[in-house]
Each structure stands twice: as C-alpha cells, then as structure tokens.
Image (tube, rainbow, N blue to C red):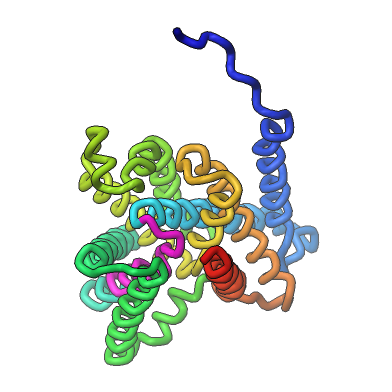
Amino acid sequence: MIDTRTPPAPPRRRRLALPAALLGVGALVVLSLFVGAYDLTADDFGGEMFFISRVPRTVALVLAGCAMAVSGLIMQLLTQNRFVEPSTTGTTEWAALGLLATVLLFPTAPLSVRMVAASVAAFVGTMIFIGILRRISLRSSLVVPLIGIMLGAVVSAFTTYLAVSTNSLQMLGTWFMGSFTSIVRGRYEVLWIVAIVVLLVFLYADRITVAGLGRDIATSVGLDHTRVLLVGTGLVAVATGVTTVVVGFLPFLGLVVPNLVSMWRGDNARANLPWVCLGGVAIVIVCDIVGRVIRMPFEVPVSMILGVVGAAVFITLLLRMRARG
C-alpha cells in the first residue's frame, strides 16, 4: 500500500533559518563596502574609489570565501575525512609551486596562463595525495591530514628553495600573504571562474555525496567512482589555483566551515552547500573587517586571522574526537 499522505511541513524556524542567514551575510557585505582607511566622503573622488577598490574587494571576498569553503567540503567527502581541506593536503602548496615555475620560465605570461598552471599543479598534487592514501594502511583519521601537511611541507620547502635560488623569495611572500589589500578593479575578474566551479558543484553534489560513501557503495548504485573523483578533484584544483593566484593562501577555511555545518545539519552535500557558501563568505568578511580595523590605517592579512581561528577549531575537533573515543 502506497502512503499518499502529504509529508509534514518543516518547522517555521527551520524554514526561516536560510533567509535569516542570507540577510546576515548581506549585512556583512554592506558593512565591508564602507569599512576602510580611506574616507569616501572626504573629497570628490570618494565615489570613484568606491567602485575601483571597495566593490572589487568585497566581490573578491565573497567569491574566494565561497570557493575555498566548498573546496573543503568536496575534499572531505571524497577522502571520507573531516580534517582534510586544500591547506592540509598540500593542494595550495602545489598551486604555489606551479605559479612560481610559470613566472620563472615565462616571466611575461599573462594572469590567465599563471592561473592555468597553478590549477594544473594543484590537480597533480591532489591526485598524488589521494594516490598515497590508497597505498597505505590508515589506522586513524588523523593520519590523513598529517600526510597532507608533510607532503605540503616538502613541496613548500622546494618552492622556497627555487625562490631563494632565483632571488624571488620576497615576491613569493607577497603573492601568498593571503590579503585582499591589492584587490582593485582589473585584478579580481578572473575570480568569477570560481563562481562557475561552485555552480558545477551544485549540479554534481549528489554524485559527490554518493562517492563519499566509498567505492563499493558508489559502484553498487551504478556510479563511476573514478570519474567522480577526477571531476571533484579538478573542481577543487581550479578553485584553489585561481584563488591562490589572485588572493593567496586562505588557511583552514575549508576545514572550519564544512565541519561546523556538518555537525549541525549532517553530511548531505546538496542540502549543506548553501550553508557552506554562506559560512565561508561570512568568516572571510568578518576576518577581513577585523584585519582592517584592528590596526587602522594598516591591515592585518586575512590569512593570519584565519590561521588563528582555524587552529582553534582544529584543536576543538580533535578534543571532540577524543571525547567520543
């Protein structure tokens, strides 16, 4: 007998949660537009500076925060590990290596070529990380991020060696500071590519969720696990490569947001994606506003504040795991 009864409507509080979150993030976006050392009302150039600097910076904050948070969610599902994200798997370090190699080999290469090189290097590095995981026996979920951090440290050391050998260390440090200070009109437009990546993740979310259950389960329901793995890794590589080239490192963002959302709402990728996007945007904007205000007229890089917040969340997750045995 088929049950034709209409399922009960979700509680009013649950239905209003997402619109309320949208309003809250929208308020942060508006606040970001009017926070800064330059007084927009001081002279006649205030309106011009608003569209040259403030609007591009805020758009970059939204796109980068959304992209890196979603990248962390994808990697955690594909590796079945909550401690994985681009900065704990060496993905960002590989992107940095690809960018530096492109600049050294082709100094006049345009931004689009550097972006492609960083994305390709990030994809190769992520596949190497996944290949290593498949060839070793994992007795603890903590081993996975440790392997990624060790791999990233080796790649970072080699990148630093190249930078020192070619007198490019200062340039390397400036690139990957993880700051939005240099974002102006004409320097952020390629970040719209990550918006396409996020859209593709929405379309591919169900397959990624099933692939995260394991190869056997994915195959049993007729899903090509290898193809989903390649597509998911490719999306993460593009998002990481583009964000690294334009902004720099945003550590732990992909670790903090997906874990907080998963603890609250479970592991359904499609249902969690809007919350992951909003959470990533909110955290990046809050950290950027704090960085702009705390030492005004100077700025503290977003990566520094994100590192402190991410480290605290990482330790909290470890303590929760230990408490659960």
Residue 50 counted in the magenta span: no
Q: Which range is magenta?
A: 80-98
Give how far across and how far down residue 307 sits, in percent: 56, 73
Residue drawn 52% across the image and 43% down it: 272
The residue at the far right in this view is 42
Q: Quadrant of the N terminus?
A: top left
Give how far across and how far down residue 215 sits, in percent: 25, 47
Viewer can see residue 183: no
Q: Is residue 29 above or below residue 201?
A: below
Q: Is residue 122 above or below residue 164?
A: above
| Frontmost residue, 241 versus 144 | 144
Q: Quadrant of residue 150?
A: bottom left
Residue drawn 52% across the image and 54% down it: 258
Residue drawn 73% across the image and 29% down it: 12
Viewer can see residue 138: yes
| Frontmost residue, 225 versus 71 | 225
In this image, 194 relative to 207: left or right?
A: right
Give how far across and how far down residue 85 sits, in percent: 42, 62
Q: Quadrant of residue 314?
A: bottom right
Q: Is residue 76 above or below residue 170?
A: above
Q: Quadrant of residue 207?
A: top left
Residue 81 counted in the magenta span: yes
Give how far across and how far down residue 321 sits, in percent: 53, 66
Q: Is residue 165 above or below residue 275?
A: below
Residue drawn 31% across the image and 76% down it: 151
Query: How many discs mark residues in the rendered view?
Result: 0
| Frontmost residue, 33 versus 313 | 313
